[in-house]
Image: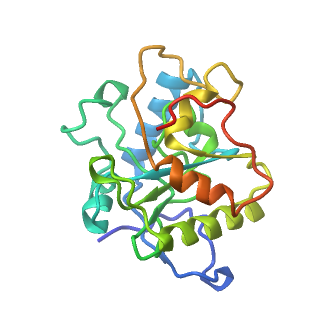
Amino acid sequence: MYHLITICFFIPLSLLALKIEQTPIEFGDVRVELTKEYIKSHYALHVKDIKIVPKIIVIHHTAIDDFEDSISRFISETLPTDRPDITSGGALNVSAHFMVERNGTIHQLMPLDFMARHVIGLNYNSIGIENVGGANSADNLTKEQLRANIFLVKELKKRFDTIEYVIGHYEYRCFEGTPLWLEVNDGYRTFKDDPSVRFMDALREEINGFKGAPCKQGRK
């Protein structure tokens, strides 16, 4: 069972036209302290809390086609031992603010003003939306997920006027050298192809008022 933490910043169900579930992952003292350590190690910032001011929405896929299997990867507060690609980045487990099932159901996993570990270099100023799917890099996200992402991006913009960008995870390295990029370890990078150019192009056709990534790097 997932545990609700005391300090919350959840979107009220009454405001939503689409179904959304409050499915909070474990985010207790251990995860908070590990997040502070991550911020110190990767961004050279000494912080009293893990609150962020979001400026970017990053769209992902989970690379797993089942919801329960996908969310199980986020439950532990510490990183599982089978993630050698990012183990060097620290003990903090990966997380995201939202996960969208293949039928379009939106799950909010954590407070929106807490930092999640979901994208190298940009965690401290971004909200992450994970979409169930993309196993073996398949471009298989559904029309229901697209509809949910369109709605969610628009809703987040209403709540945070600080948000300027909507990007696919595969575009994250476009921000290197910009003020939004905070990663201090030049050797800490991973290849990403999610969620797909097709999905991002379809999403961008339905949203307005956002900037895209400042380059084409990483497109597949």
**x, y percent for residue 47:** 60, 33
Q: Position of residue 6 (x, y in %)?
A: 51, 65
Q: Nearer the viewer, residue 198 or 82?
A: 198
What coloring was used for the rendering?
Answer: rainbow
Is the residue 187 above or below the residue 151 in the image? above
Residue at image location 29% in from the left, 30% down from the top: 85
* Residue ranking furthest to the top: 186
User: Residue 126's image quarter?
Assistant: top right
Residue 170 horizontal side relative to residue 201, left or right:
left
**Front-most of residues 5 and 156:** 156
| Quadrant of the drawing holding the N terminus | bottom left
Name which residue lies at 56% across and 43% down: 50
Residue pictured at 37% horizontal, 67% vertical = 3
Looking at this view, is 126 or 36 the one in front? 126
Residue at the image point whose x is 68% and y is 81% from the top: 15
Query: Which residue is nearer to you in this view: 43 or 189?
Result: 189
Q: Is residue 207 above or below residue 107?
A: above
Picture quadrant where residue 204 is located? bottom right
Q: How many numbered circles does the render carry?
A: 0
Where residue 57 appears, x then y in whole percent? Answer: 62, 49
Name the residue at the left extreme: 82
Q: Is residue 145 above or below residue 88?
A: below
Position of residue 74 in the picture relative to residue 11 (left or right):
left
